[in-house]
Amino acid sequence: MAAGTDRVKQILSWYSSDNVGVKTNLARLMNHGALAGTGKFVILPVDQGFEHGPARSFAPNPPAYDPDYHFQLAIDSGCNAYAAPLGFLEAAADKFVGQIPTILKLNNSDMLAKIEQPISAVTATVKDAVRLGCAAIGYTIYPGSSARNPMYEALRELIREAKEVGLPTIVWAYPRGAGLSKEGEQAVDVVAYSAHVSCELGAHIVKVKPPKDVVEQAEAKKVFEKYEIPTKTMADRVRHVVQSCFNGKRIVIFSGGETKGTTELLEDVRGMAAGGGFGSIMGRNAFQRPRAEAMKLLGDVMEIYRKAS
């Protein structure tokens, strides 16, 4: 598909309150890479060094310790964009100017503090994103944490500031906290709720984990049963999450999750695509593989979404 297709124009029409700068950068994301013009996304995110530690993230594929590696992988595979924290982008952005849209992750947390109610630190600014030529900012919220309200309030201010300079916001919505079971973090009702909260806060794009066939909240379980909301297949669950984001009028993309086998991963992606998901944001499942394997995997994922567009 050529850039500026009817599908891209349709998606942009859902953001009518936003200024031209924001919509231009949304179009920039949609009109780049192998999926240009389809309204679908495959994004390479590399914040795992900060989030999980360098050895856990990069030892399986040592070239990935180098920030240049990820830029080149995202470019060569045809990703829509590359997302990373401040340090990784600053280390390589000048070398790859103009070759791929970038997303600056504005907050991060580390694994060294073991706390029940997580909250991320703001580690970069909107001005940093502008300085680095980014197409969007990214921010993580933890719905379910007792520290969620400061995160929501900080996000609202960052979204407002980013809009003023023409940048859209991608929200990583990761439910966790003492009020949720480990299984409940990916329960279909909790994922859909977290995605909806992100949209209410003003997210242009929402990133969530693949929802599982579990309903965590007792109150939600009654509704799912009464109205026979289907949850058995990945497509069913993704369809519900997308519907929860303003009836599909917000872009919802899904993470690859923890490292898994290629067959299982691609089966999940087929379900996401069949359920109306807008794409995948795939980090460890890509960059922890040898480069040739990563290129093939990302190409296969893009082909699944292309066929579904």
Image: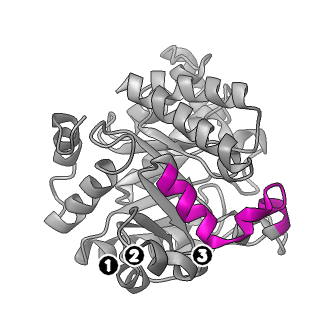
Q: Tell me where residue 64 sits by quadrant.
A: bottom right
What's the image's color scheme? one colour
Residue that carries the numbered disc 3 in the rendered image: 88
Q: Tell me where residue 56 sits by quadrant.
A: bottom right
Extent of the magenta region:
55-76
**Which mark, residue 287?**
none
Residue that carries the numbered disc 2 in the rendered image: 158
Magenta-colored stretch includes residue 73: yes
Please tell me how crowded label 2 is: few (under 14), some (14-19), or many (20+) other residues with Cα within 10 Å. Answer: some
- In what element is the residue under mark 3? helix
Please tell me how crowded label 1 is: few (under 14), some (14-19), or many (20+) other residues with Cα within 10 Å. Answer: some
Residue type for callout 2:
Leu
- In what element is the residue under mark 1? helix
Of mark 1 and mark 3, the one earlier in the sequence is 3
CA gap, disc 3 and disc 2:
21 Å
Please tell me how crowded label 3 is: few (under 14), some (14-19), or many (20+) other residues with Cα within 10 Å. Answer: many
Left or right: 218 in relation to 301: right
The reply to whether the C-beta atoms of the residues labelled 3 and 2 are less than 8 Å apart is no
- Discs 3/2, front: 3
